[in-house]
Image (cartoon, coloured by chain):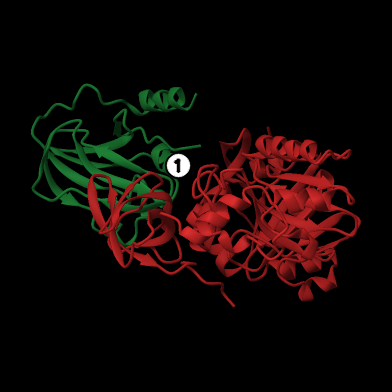
Chain colours: A green, B red
Amino acid sequence: MPDFPSDLHYSQTHEWVRVEGNRATVGISDYAQTQLGDVVYVELPEVGAHVEFGGEVAVVESVKAASDIYAPVTGEVVDANDELDSAPETVNADPYGDGWFFIIEMTNDELPSDLLTAEGYEAHCQAEGE
Amino acid sequence: MKTPLAELHAEAGARFIEFAGWQMPVHYGSQLEEHHAVRNHAGCFDVSHMAVVDLDSGYAEPLLRRLLVSDVSRLNAGDAVYSLMLNERGGIVDDLITYRREHGYRLVVNAGTTRKDLDWIARCERELKTTATAHHRNELCIIAVQGPQAVKNVRNLLNLRELNELESFTFVERADYFVARTGYTGEDGVEVICSAEAAIDLWSRLVTNGVQPVGLGARDSLRLEAGLNLYGHDMSDDTNPFECRVAWTIDWEDEDRDFIGRSVVEHVRDEGALTKLVGLKLTERGIPREGFAVQTKEGAGIVTSGTFSPTLKQGIALARVPVSTRGSCQVEVRRRLIPAKIARLPFVRRNI
């Protein structure tokens, strides 16, 4: 069974967000990595790029398919996980830890209202799987 | 539909996908690990969704000499041959393996084309006014065991000492198991045809002995690295053998043998095909997928199959391009043009 940590926020497009102050760390959920299968490439955004909630910012490509990653918050990219270049399999092995994608410094203090709680996201995944 | 091994797959943590109406394992956790297991050790595949078709002796030989591009009269009992059925337009109805048994022949055809193939065979039977009919053995299972350690494992488990000396594209029959030295991965190995009960027993013992269960995901990346076509993708009813790198299967020798499609493929042989199937290696990061556009100096082409090669760690593809295409080209991957080189096939050679 996929893992849905309760301290994270989730988007309907399967990104997770960990908020610390005005910094939001973003990755893809355990459910998403299971659906994708083995990840072989991750294309990350440039540090310094301005990203808008819902905009395409990264690409994750697995043996099965390429998928867009959407910004779950609005702000500026301040860090990207370059380790994924040489070890993309980390996304499968540790999606909520070392498999993080990038960090956004948020423009707004409030999170977008579209983001889901762990419980809401789990229900969303179940509905999608049916 | 499910194969008799479905329960064992579920217990082993398989993720299933639908393939030609069958629920088949796509992987058991990691497609990449399964791929490497076959290249480096041994893996087992449940390919029971493919169809076994038996033909009695007597009527089978004239039928198959009309139906197939290969001349089965050249086969001895115990021989197998990779072959094609063509339609009257020279297009490929299916690719298949034909086995010549002591009495009669056995065909193994693709899952997605089983109905079409049986209809095509029946049509040919009517044309030749045969009294016998092909027998679809849908109660039988097929297990492929592939990789450098595959033969050793099967030999020990089935106590088949002669397996070591069994040549490529030959087979042996025992009471419970039909074992052929064939496969679809580019590695050494066997394909075993047997009853459901025998298959469950063999599969369990293979896995207990450390042979890795492998799903359809790795089956596809393995066959593509080996430069082997997939029916319905790299070849179809609308492409002829010269356009698909499989004209070598045609046996021209007996000029009186009028196999279906002969006059058309003779014409293509003499006049030349307009397109060809080539291997492509992407020289920058990107994964080519089926349907992606290819740009060459000689004109437009299209990717017929593509994947990330776990062995080469780069994108590889089979692509249909203008026949004069040489050297390099570009593949349009997600709105970007990625440079690619025409590569010699197979992409990956066997581990010895």
The residue sitting at 30% across, 37% down in the picture is: A16
Q: Is residue A122 left or right of residue A100?
A: right
Instruction: Report helix, strand or loop for mark 1.
Output: helix
Mark 1 belongs to which amino acid? Thr
The residue sitting at 29% across, 30% down in the picture is: A11
Question: Residue B195 at what x, y percent from top left?
Answer: 83, 46
Query: Where is B51 relative to A88, above or below?
Result: above
Depth check: give the residue in front, B260 or B25.
Answer: B260
Q: Is residue B216 left or right of residue B132?
A: left
Disc 1 crowd, CA 10 A, few/some/many (<14, 14-19, 20+)? some
Depth check: give the residue in front, B77 or B91.
Answer: B91
- Residue A127 figure quarter: top left
Residue B198 seen from this side = no
Residue at which label 1 appears: A34
Q: Quadrant of the N terminus of chain B?
A: top right
Query: Where is A16 relative to B293, above or below?
Result: above
Question: Residue B191 at what x, y percent from top left?
Answer: 72, 58
The residue sitting at 85% across, 58% down in the picture is: B101
Query: Where is B75 relative to A70, above or below?
Result: below
Q: Is residue B299 left or right of residue B122?
A: left
The residue sitting at 84% across, 73% down in the picture is: B161
Q: Quadrant of the C terminus of chain B?
A: bottom right
- Residue B146 figure quarter: bottom right
- Residue B9 figure quarter: top right
